[in-house]
Amino acid sequence: MKYNHLLLFALALLFFSCDKKANYNPDDHLTAATKDEVMTKLIRYLAKPPENTSDVEKFDKQYDEYYLDKMSRAKLELYYPAGRETYFLISQEAASLYGKRHATGGKFKLNDKGELVEYEEIFRTWKMMPDTLLRRGGMLFDRMVKGESLEPYWTKNSNGEEYVEFPDPNVYYDKAERKWKTKA
């Protein structure tokens, strides 16, 4: 009887001491309709705009069909709501003969009306095969959510392994303008 109590105590201790991993599966947080709403809010920042389109013009209704097509080719890979801030990892097709994709990891906030009030891209990966992208992008996403530095995975620091294309020492994300820029 004494050993049963010890075993039960050890199992309880093990159970409660385990680090519970956050659930990043978008399907566990969103319905298909709310996934589309999220993607609709973000796609005009993530996707390359139509040629000769300004940052203001890309929001014009005339480009809705263009962005719907881009949205249909993008995939919400990971998603994590943390209070009013929500983290995302969205992959898109990359120019490749082999079906490679690249992913963008970032975060956003909505107001009480569901309007996007803050948006920031934290990193963009190099183009990779989908299974490699999910493995590496998932690790980067987890570090991002936990507030850990991604600098060890920048190209200059990653010992030949491709993880983060940018930011880098020359490219940064301008949160106010919601786009990547190069340093002057």
Image (cartoon, helix red, strand yellow):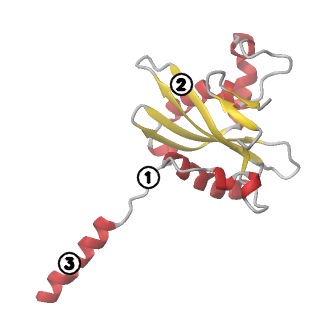
Q: CA distance from mark 3 to mark 1?
A: 26 Å
In this orientation, which residue lies closer to the viewer: 183 or 45?
Answer: 183
Amino acid, disc 1 = Ala
What SS does tag 1 mark?
loop
Mark 2 or 1: in front is 2
Pointer 2: what residue?
118
Pointer 1: what residue?
22
* Residue found at the far front of this picture: 184
Earlier sequence position, callout 2 versus callout 3: 3
The x and y percentages for residue 34 are 50, 30
Pointer 3: what residue?
8
Crowding at dot 3, Cα within 10 Å, few <14 / some 14-19 / many 20+, comes out as few
Vertical side of 104 occupied by 110: above or below: above
Say if residue 37 shows up in the picture: yes
Earlier sequence position, callout 3 versus callout 1: 3
Q: Is residue 92 left or right of residue 109?
A: right
Amino acid, disc 3 = Leu
